[in-house]
Amino acid sequence: MSSLIGFLSLALAIGINFYLLISRYVFKFQKQRFKFFVRVSSLLTLLSFFSLMYAYVTSDFSNYNVFQNSHSNKPLIYKISGTWGNHEGSMLLWLCILSIFSFFFSFTKNIEENFQKLTLIIQAFLHTLFSLFIVFTSNPFLVNSILVDEGLGLNPILQDPGLAVHPPILYAGYVGYSIVFSIAIAGLFQNTDNEWLYVAKKWSLISWTFLTGGIALGSYWAYYELGWGGWWFWDPVENISLMPWIAGLALVHSLMMVRGEQAIKKWIVFLSILCFSLSVFGTFLVRSGILTSVHSFAADASRGIFILLIFFIITGFGFLVFLLKEPKKSNTLNLLFINKVSALVINNILMIIATLTILLGTIYPIIIEVLYNKRISVGGPYFNSTVIPIMIPGFLLMSIAPILSWQTNKIKNSKKYVLGFIILSILVFIQSYLLDFNTWGFVGLLLGFWIVLASIIAIFSYYKVKLNLKYFKIINPHIAHIGVGIAIIGITCSSVFQNELDFNLNEGDKFKVNGKMVLFEEVETTNQINFQALRGKFLFDIEKNKSKKIEAGKNYYPVSKMITSEAGILHQWNKDIYFILGDQKNNEWFVKVLINPFVSFIWLGVIIMVYSGLIAVTRR
Amino acid sequence: MSLRFQRLLLILLTLIIILSAVLLILYNARENVSYFYTPSEIDKSEITINKVIRIGGFVENDSFNKISSSSFKFRITDEKASILVNFDGILPDLFREGQGAVIEGSFDNKYVFNATNVFAKHDENYLPASIKEDLKNTGYWNKKYK
């Protein structure tokens, strides 16, 4: 029943959207009625999504999708989040978020009516494309042809709270760029004044903030769930999410330039189209199964071709409009040597090149295979040694860019900065020299600390401290940069100074980690609702009274006959101690302990970035 | 400063950055890219010792040997040829005899491969597309691997 409701409302929503799309030529709506239909179609899509969720929650195995991906003894939270733990459901989530964005956009005030309408028509166009894709290649409402009373179960790797938050937030980021895309195209068609740039700014900030949060949640999930002890693997899917993120960052920064007199509209439009194209391109690469990764669900060629088609339609349409309808000439740029505008221009160039480098590395294996019929893999080392050097000048620039002036060459208080930089360099140099000297570590730490320090100097020497929203809005760019600086420190420490220890232990053995005694108590198996848990129990720092318990082990899921690793992590503010339980022979267990210094700084940095994204969105 | 000069400066700067990016990419594409083979392709081609490559195939039945809790020996096969692999560390959760796996590492000598990384397939129904194609080509293709 719920499947039927879901499918019908999905189909009805397509009908409405198609009608909105052609309404321009066939039958002109009144403005208010037009918006009404937009909202109705959004609510219908939402209803469709919730009826799928209802089928999951009630374990309605007459729905083929539920039968394939769910099991009645799963905890409730995984029944809910299992809705998007498969290809069909995740595409419906994608569509649902798209229509939520249209819904909210239809409420935007202070915007020209015709312009808003045109934007919503383009949204309706996107909605129609994606919902046709869902109906024809990945319908989640298919009826199960056999009668069953039990489902096949959800992939155990996905049975984690991470699934509940990571995909929706990440998708909100990806799909949010659809609004930015529509705004930019509508802006090209209407060619009005600069007002649409302010609207675009708000929505691109929202998308970017979601994307940042979504990527960080995903990498935190990978960190504790996959049990490799790292949080970023340069997996194709990670690269794909990074590309619209960097392009979106460039977009947000170039929209800042609108604040000065000169707007580079053309570039902004280009970036807006690029961001959404990269999002769709990412979906294509993941869903088509061309790239292999944790995220690819069962591959299906017809889906890949369909999404490729959508990608070409959207990108082709976008860039075609871009070429044909050039924005009106705005004032030319004033690139004096050292001012804010030139800093932003350089930052944009660097970011786009970084995006292209990642893109190249990600699709390089495909190109080589097609051309030479040889298979290669491009891994972390390639990305580390190309992307990071490209980004370094940008990082250097961002430490001082916010205090450059829009018009002149002067930097106030330059002495303070020079002095600060010299002292900091010496301190970091001494510090790295006392530990093992490592070039990357030195560069990373210096950059990170310098960005934080320069931003703090700027905040205190330029603005009077006040505790109101206006003050927080003014210092917001600096706060965002402090977040980046802190994240860089965390990234550098945790990747360069990671320490790995291997042990072969019997139960009851004691061993030393980081100068603290650890007791390997015992290995225990317990039965949980839908899995068996094997846990090695450790007591950290037994010489003190307040010793901490750490459990690391594996889960065995009988439904899907799969094992997942469960790392035991002891979080401290300055380091994570990461326990992995390995194999055993003759009651001797292999235990790997990783010491990841300052991982918490990465998450702290991201939280600061998300915070400043939110502050930037709020109205003045 | 004249507009022309500014534009020139901008273009020059962009070119310099692009040039350095290209140089970086070219350099790294040579150094940091690893080739992917199946066991039967290895036998034919000349083995370069200590060059990092990846090998994809299946873990041969009855070949898995646990030397200690952290050191393993097994053979990886595509039914035409098989290669002896040494691995120290923690095997992925889905590593099993008869299942698909990709190993990364280098040859110690002509016969023994030292793996630094072992990747097992992530899903019962899922096999990397590249391996699938090879297995179809070599005829070792079991229907149950979708």
Image (cartoon, coloured by chain):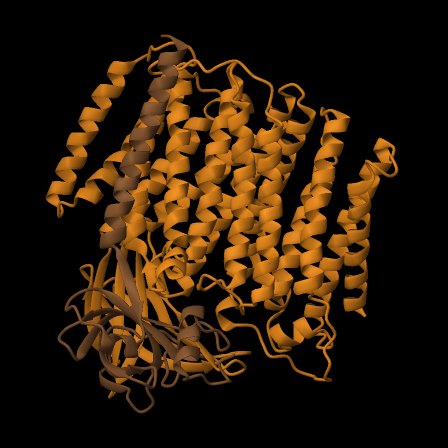
The residue shown at (13%, 45%) is: A437
Name the residue furthest front.
A371
| Chain A drawing hue | orange
Drawn side of residue A53 relative to residue B33, left or right = right
Is A111 above or below relative to A225? above
- For residue A82, which quarter of the picture? bottom right
The residue shown at (13%, 46%) is: A435
Q: Nearer the viewer, residue A474 or A315?
A: A315
Name the residue furthest bottom.
B62
Q: Position of residue A210 (x, y in %)?
A: 54, 44
Q: Position of residue B138 (x, y in %)?
A: 38, 81
Q: Nearer the viewer, residue A333 or A143?
A: A333
Number of dots carrying numbers: 0
User: Which quadrant: the N terminus of chain A?
Assistant: bottom right
The residue shown at (32%, 29%) is: B15
Name the residue furthest left.
A434
| Residue A456 seen in this snapshot | no
Q: Position of residue A618 (x, y in %)?
A: 59, 30
- For residue B113, which quarter of the picture? bottom left
Is A344 above or below relative to A17? above
| Residue A226 seen in this snapshot | yes
Q: Position of residue A305 (x, y in %)?
A: 58, 59
| Chain B drawing hue | brown
Is A500 above or below relative to A36? below
User: Which quadrant: the C terminus of chain A?
Assistant: top right
Q: Nearer the viewer, residue B116 or A350?
A: A350
